[in-house]
Amino acid sequence: CFRENVPEHQVITVKYTIPDVPPEHPCTMQTTSPGGAVEKKQLELPTGRWAVVSKSAGDHDMCLTCGHGEWFHKAEKLKVTIAFDILGSDSLADVAEGALSAGRLSTTGEAIRELLERVHAIHDENEYEKFEEADFRRMSESVNNRVMLFSVLQVLLMIGCSLYQMYSLVDFM
């Protein structure tokens, strides 16, 4: 399983190669969103591509499962190649049409269109990073304020204990 923090409305494409799987051992790819929504797909072996659109921002779990469903079956070692790519929200139509093939980049206009889509994807990723950074900064400042308050309370408690000890020492003498 893999966990990836994905922005909202982004396209996750998974390219896989599983050359050594016998046909009687089906493989499935499962994606779980932060909200718990599960999407499964029976994979076509030995190579293929799968695209999923993230409906919410957060950690998405992507699991690949191959093999028997039996409990006492001997596990087999597999060689698997997986590549994850997160595209911008503008690339959803291209993925749905299957237009992301290598033959599409034959003309200069198509290459420029692909470059613009990548720029949009980078822009979306930068906006997401800004949001995450602001959230982290807010959380960090909150923790720092709590630590400062705790330190001030500690100092006041120490001063109070010291004053009490001095008062007790004066009474003792």
Image (spheres, rainbow, N blue to C red):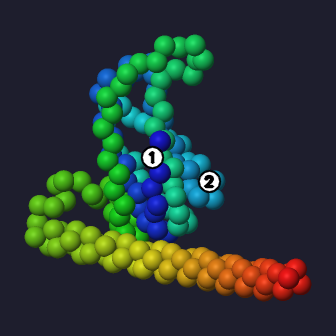
Name the residue furthest front. 173
What residue sits right under mark 2 in the picture? Answer: 37
Residue at x 26% of width, y 75% of height? 119
In the image, 93 versus 74, the foreground residue is 74
Total count of labels: 2
From the viewer's perspective, is residue 39 above or below residue 117?
above
Residue 126, given in percent of the width and then of the height, sits at 36, 76
Q: Which residue is mark 1?
A: 2
Farthest residue in the right direction? 171
Would you say residue 135 is visible in this rendering?
no
Query: Which quadrant, please, contains the C terminus?
Result: bottom right
* Residue 97 locus on image (x, y percent): 35, 59
Along the line of sight, the residue nearer the viewer: 19 or 101: 19
Q: Amino acid at mark 2?
A: Ala
Q: Is residue 29 above or below residue 106?
A: above
Q: Residue at the spot x=37%, y=61% of the render?
A: 86
Circle 2: element type: loop
Q: Is residue 51 visible?
A: yes
Question: Dot 2, crowdedness within 10 Å: few (<14), some or many (≥20)?
Answer: few
Instruction: Decide if residue 168 is on the left or right side of residue 124.
Output: right
- Tag 1's secondary structure? strand
The image's mark for residue 112 is none
The vertical placement of 5 against 146, above or below, is: above
Residue 24 placement (x, y as % from top left): 45, 18
Amino acid tagged 1: Phe
Left or right, 12 with reference to 172: left
